[in-house]
Amino acid sequence: MVNKTLYILFLMSISLQFANGQKLVIPENYSIIDSISGDLDNDSINELVIAFNTTPEYEMESVIRELIIYKLENNKWTVWKKSSQALYASLDGGMMGDPFGEMEIKNGIIHISHNGGSSWKWRITDKYRFQDGEFYLIGFTSFSGKPCEYWEDFDFNLSTGKMIFNKEFEDCESEDQKTDKKENETLYEKGLKITLQNRQEKEIKITSPKYGHEIYIAIGKE
């Protein structure tokens, strides 16, 4: 617990150092998980993106998280966009616990990764780009599987609608643990509009026509 507290304080110091004297107001009871900066709307001014816990963390209680994007206005960090659906809760990683992986900005696009599982493992990455006044999901990748059973990866470009799905089955009874079966499929799903704010608002499931794989783009909020 002490180490986690020190880590949170360290991340807070990073954000404040980045602010260079500009005022940053952290919501009451919130704590910083991670922070990044970069130009997200092509105005040559960096924005600040912070992942927050919305309540104090306790070992056996899952904490809801919020993503807040700040713009610099009149020498003060002002909330620009925020979402309670872009980040998984603190215990959504299953046996591995905290699912938060990392955030980064590449070419003005926000990348957010989560992972979890136990013997069966999973990892997903969302990519958001600011366009038409909102941050839209433009890319979604996932990787999951279990040793000696299968590994599958999925890549969805929401801008083009193109999806690529690959699945490889493992046979651990053989000495070289070779892959004895592969399933590869390309399909298209155009027109999905998913924003930072409504990322998990409703369940979005796509069934591939060739092999009948059920692919979840969003799980839906209860």
Image (spheres, helix red, strand yellow):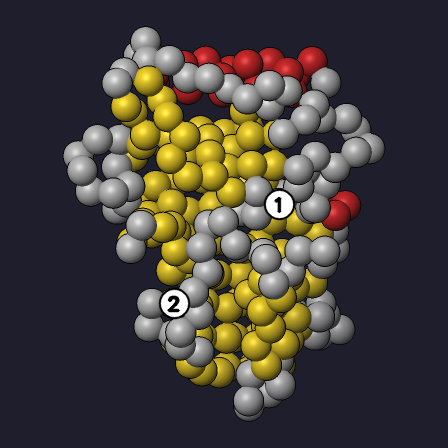
Mark 1 neighbour density, 10 Å: few (under 14) some (14–19) many (20 or more): many
Q: Is residue 59 left or right of residue 162?
A: right
Residue 88, label in figure: 1
Residue 148, label in figure: none
Residue 122: horizontal and vertical position, in percent? 62, 56
**According to the image, label 2 marks what residue?**
157
Looking at numbered disc 2 in the image, what kind of residue is underneath it?
Asn
Q: Is residue 70 above or below residue 198?
A: above
Q: Residue at x 55, y 90 (%)?
A: 210
Q: Residue furthest top?
A: 21
Q: Is residue 69 left or right of residue 54?
A: left
Looking at this view, is 200 or 35 the one in front? 200
Q: Is residue 68 above or below residue 170?
A: above
Q: Residue at x 69, y 46 (%)?
A: 93
Residue 102: horizontal and vertical position, in percent? 49, 39
Residue 1: horizontal and vertical position, in percent? 72, 18
What whole-number distance in Å separates the C-alpha atoms at marks 2 and 1?
Answer: 21 Å
Looking at numbered disc 1 in the image, what kind of residue is underneath it?
Tyr
